[in-house]
Amino acid sequence: MIKEFVKSLHEDGNERLRVRLTIKKGELVDILFQYESFIKNKWTSIVSYDLAYGFFHRDVLKPDGEKEKTVIEIAGLMEASIFCRAGY
């Protein structure tokens, strides 16, 4: 089961948080917390926390288009989810 929601972060509607949680047999198996901004008529990821490469990490999109990836050591997905929510 995948639960996904989007939360507006600014009254103009141009900043949002997108969250996707994947749950199998009652266990959290994948997460995505992504801060997005509406730039040049499309939603652009600015900061994301996920497991896309098999490990928990943060991606930051720099203004020049380069992505900075930082591995985050954390005990489990529930702790990772709490870590992400605290940042937003």
Image: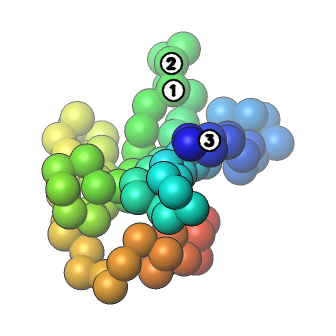
Q: Position of residue 58 (x, y in %)?
A: 30, 61
Identify whether 76 is placed above or below 40.
Answer: below
Q: Is residue 26 left or right of residue 13?
A: left
Q: Are marks 1 and 2 in contact (CB under 8 Å)?
A: yes
Q: Position of residue 82 (x, y in %)?
A: 54, 77
Depth order, front residue of 76/36: 76
Q: Which mark is residue 4?
A: 3
Whether residue 77 appears in this view of the structure is: yes
Which residue is disc 2 drawn over? 42
How far apart marks 2 and 3 lie (CA) works out to 19 Å
Image quadrant in which you'd find residue 13: top right
Which residue is disc 1 drawn over? 43
Q: Amino acid at mark 1?
A: Trp
- In the rendered structure, which disc, 2 or 3, sits on the residue that comes first in sequence? 3
Density class for disc 3 (Cα within 10 Å; few <14, some 14-19, many ≥20) is few
Q: Position of residue 33 (x, y in %)?
A: 49, 54
What residue sits 41% from the left and 58% below the top? 29
What residue sits 54% from the left and 14% below the top? 41
Give the label, 3 or 1, closer to the camera: 3
Give the label, 2 or 3, closer to the camera: 3
What residue sits 42% from the left and 38% below the top? 45
Q: Secondary structure at mark 2?
A: strand
- Scheme of image coloration: rainbow
Density class for disc 1 (Cα within 10 Å; few <14, some 14-19, many ≥20) is some
How far apart marks 1 and 2 lie (CA) works out to 4 Å
Q: Amino acid at mark 2?
A: Lys
